[in-house]
Amino acid sequence: MKSLTNALLITYILATGALALAKDSLKYPLVPVADKDTELDKEKTDKVLKLVNYVITKNDQKGLLSHKPDTALDRSYQGVQAVMKIGDTRYTIWVANEDETQKIHLDDVLSIWTRPDGTYGQKYITTFSDNGLDGNCDFGITPAMNEVGRILFNQEFAEGNEHKKKFQKIYDSAIDDLINFYESK
């Protein structure tokens, strides 16, 4: 009898849309996708999925400067932005959690922007992203704060591939720092 009651309740909820998602819940499953010609590394993927889950669900984390749970441009994905300061660095994290049931959809994405706290403007921002949540940095730009100028890495268009290791190191370090932030009390 209990399972019939649950089934009826679920049917009612699905038919009427009577259940609204809490603002701090996952709207769609997080789906890691390996970059072209690579395989998923479980350890790296698990770390990224842990961080993305925290960004979406831990809206009351001590130390958060901002948490915007619905920054999607349309309803085909869940967009969440979180901002925090760790040490002397300000982090802005943006997650696009795609609805994989749509005929046309993109991979889930984690983008991170960092800048020295107290600075403003693009000339101070380092940005990097992971398309597919596989733990691999796919894109990055550093500020033009030295004689080298801005450094660009874009795996999709094979630009700046000589900088891939540098950006992967920055990305891995940021993932560790951010997980530590979310796991602190």
Image (cartoon, rainbow, N blue to C red):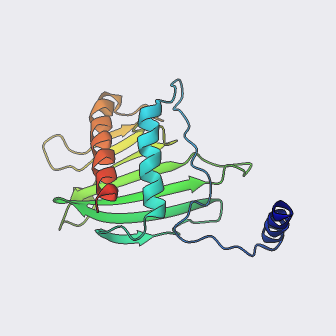
Q: Position of residue 165 (x, y in %)?
A: 30, 30
Tell me if residue 135 can be seen.
no
Q: Position of residue 23 (x, y in %)?
A: 54, 71
With 126 as the anchor, is 9 left or right in this view? right
With 58 as the anchor, is 101 left or right in this view? right
Task: Tell me what residue is drawn at x 38 percent, y 58 percent.
Answer: 93
The quadrant of the image that shows the C terminus is: bottom left
**Residue 18 location, quadrant:** bottom right
Q: Position of residue 153 (x, y in %)?
A: 35, 38
In this view, the residue in front, 160 or 79, is: 79
In this view, the residue in front, 119 or 87, is: 87
Q: Vertical placement of 177 versus 21: above or below?
A: above
Q: Vertical placement of 29 versus 62: above or below?
A: above
Tell me if residue 36 can be seen.
yes
The quadrant of the image that shows the N terminus is: bottom right
**Residue at the extreme top of the image, as rendered:** 37
**Residue at the extreme front of the image, as rendered:** 1
In this view, the residue in front, 48 or 92, is: 48
Task: Tell me what residue is drawn at x 13 percent, y 42 percent.
Answer: 147
Q: Position of residue 32 (x, y in %)?
A: 54, 40
With 119 as the anchor, is 179 left or right in this view? right
Task: Tell me what residue is drawn at x 61 percent, y 61 percent.
Answer: 27
